Amino acid sequence: MDQQEALNALAVVGNGVVADALETETLDFKVVGESQKSTYNLLADALVCFANARGGTVVLGVDDKATSRHDALRGVPADYSIDSIRKGVFDRTRPPITPFVNDVIINGVRLILITVPEGVMPHSNAAGLSTRRLGKECLPYPPDQQREVMIARGQVDWSADSSSVDFSNLSAIEFERLRRILTAGGRDNLADLSNKALLESLRLIASDGSVTNAGVLLLGDESLISTVVPSYGYSFQFRPSSGSEATGRIRGNRPLIAAIPILTEAIEARREIHPLNLAGGVQLSLTDYPSEAIRELIINAFIHRSYETSGTVDVEHSPERLAIVSPGGLVAGVTPANILTYPSTPRNRLLTETVSVLQLAERTGQGVDRAYREMLRIGKEPPQFEDKGTLVRATLAGGIGNDAFARFVSDLPVKAGRDLNVLLALSHLRHNSSIDASKLANIIQRTPIEAQEVLAAMADEYGLLEATRRTISKPFPTYRLRSEALAAMSRSVTYRRRVIDDTDQKVIEHVKEYGFITNQTIRRLFDLHVYAARDLINSLRDREILEKIGDARGGVGVRYGPGPKFPKKKS
């Protein structure tokens, strides 16, 4: 088993970082108990918790609250042998767990790494208590949740079950729609097959020869779907403002491949779009709700909802927000706090795979990432997810994106501009003057060590960040935007700088020396395009550091000199 996460964490424990801050959904730290019996009970409980989730590693011999490295690395006595730990855990778990165990020496201290993979069946301790790790907590794991986990692991798949419907009862219209989708996606080899051969190729025929539930959802007509899947349906309503009466409504139960364009087109018809001119004649569209984000979230709502739970997929649209609600909670193991990084766990595996083959959405597990990315790239907040247990709500904030941030992202290297972790860090720095690995880890839903790698790349590879002098030698330094990046982001930054920063200082020094500054000079000083330079000038004018001088109304002749709050020379 891979124990690299644990080894990476041990490299920084106690060096200004407490072990508790490094614990994750797959990593925990424990100290030896008062007796071997109590220690083995402690390990059995922790490993049951891991096995019922994604698996994980317990590091025995580390105090997760100690601040110094000496106090944190407590160690494990020699009488705890690898075989005795394995047997201690095996005897205290049902079904028995045989963990992977090995010891390591860190700073002369013996520690034990105990790892368990994700379990095939639910486990409990010797007393029959079953728990499951979510985040950094071990929570009760009742039978209904155990079934959900079996669904998530592909051991149960409602969409692959037989519907008892013969393929001849499916809709000829929907078969034609399916073939058009396949042809548009370059899958002519499938589109040319007969109806039955096409269903077999897509694995939509069950073992008894009837169509699967997924096949009915994709290719049945409304009457057939109502009979076979009475819980299926969708609705849309538009309100001119969040508190007003709905002025547009749609309700139906057309098959899935027809329902998706119905809902997306209803939203598209009411979207607000502003064109944005970029340097080099490139044009970008700022919008309240990006098309790709909308489509991915709507498809996710259909393919990941519970069809064993009553309720419909409902879209609520207003200028203030767009909410997409689907029946059933998030798939077992997935939470709003790990939705970006949890391994792909489709509730309806066959339906999800078929939608992926049809190229209706991003490949499995990438839809949420794409929705995040498209919102962030235009300067908007990412989607918000709520798990109410019986339903999931995905919400997009309304309003047009931020043009200054969109321009800034468009000028980044392609790799950085498409990196979701970089975009999330930059989005945070729009509203906060600094960031470190502990903060970023929560935002990108990864470990602090992985977050530090992101920040280091943003500093060293992309030149966007710099570590503060006071923290530069720490394992997790505090970072802030470099003056050039801050200047380029300009009006997208919402916090007010309390002191004059490096960017302001460079402008001030130039004006002190030459008496004025122009847009062209600022572009040369900070390597900005004309729009970002304009934003920086407007920021300085808003703070009355600069003011326009002369009679020029526009163009290269416009100059800016000292404003009322321009720093005076000290006498």
Image: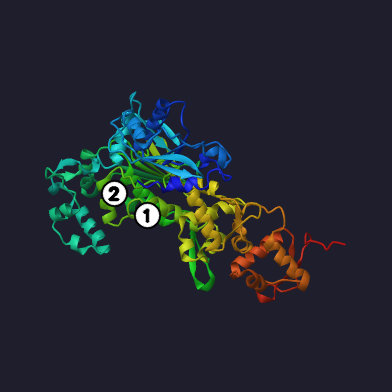
Relative height, residue 534 to residue 149 (above, below) = below
Q: Secondary structure at mark 1?
A: helix
Q: How is the image coloured?
A: rainbow
Asked which quadrant contains residue 528, the reply is: bottom right
Category of crowding for the residue at label 2, using alpha-carbon neighbours closer than 10 angstroms: few (below 14), some (14–19), many (at least 20): many
Which residue does the image show at 88% across and 62% down from the upper left? 571
**At which x and y percent is residue 33?**
46, 28
Total tally of numbered discs in the picture? 2
For this orientation, the residue located farthest to the front is: 78
In this view, the residue in front, 160 or 59, is: 59
Marks 1 and 2 close (CB-CB < 8 Å): no
Can residue 196 be seen by looking at this rendering?
Answer: yes
How far across and how far down the image is residue 7, in percent? 45, 47
Q: Residue furthest bottom?
A: 557
357, above or below 237, in the image: below
Secondary structure beneath dot 2 equals helix
Residue labelled with disc 2: 352
Q: Which mark is residue 265?
A: 1
The residue nearer to you, when weighing 303 against 237, is 303
Q: In the image, 380: left or right of 182?
A: right
Foreground residue, 442 or 504? Answer: 442
Q: Can you see residue 251?
A: no
Q: Is residue 45 above or below residue 424?
A: above
Q: Position of residue 17 (x, y in %)?
A: 56, 44
Give, as a three-letter code, the residue at label 1.
Answer: Glu
Label 1 – label 2 distance at C-alpha? 22 Å
Within 10 Å of the Cα at label 1, are there few (<14), some (14-19), or many (20+) other Cα atoms? few
Q: Position of residue 183 (x, y in %)?
A: 24, 63
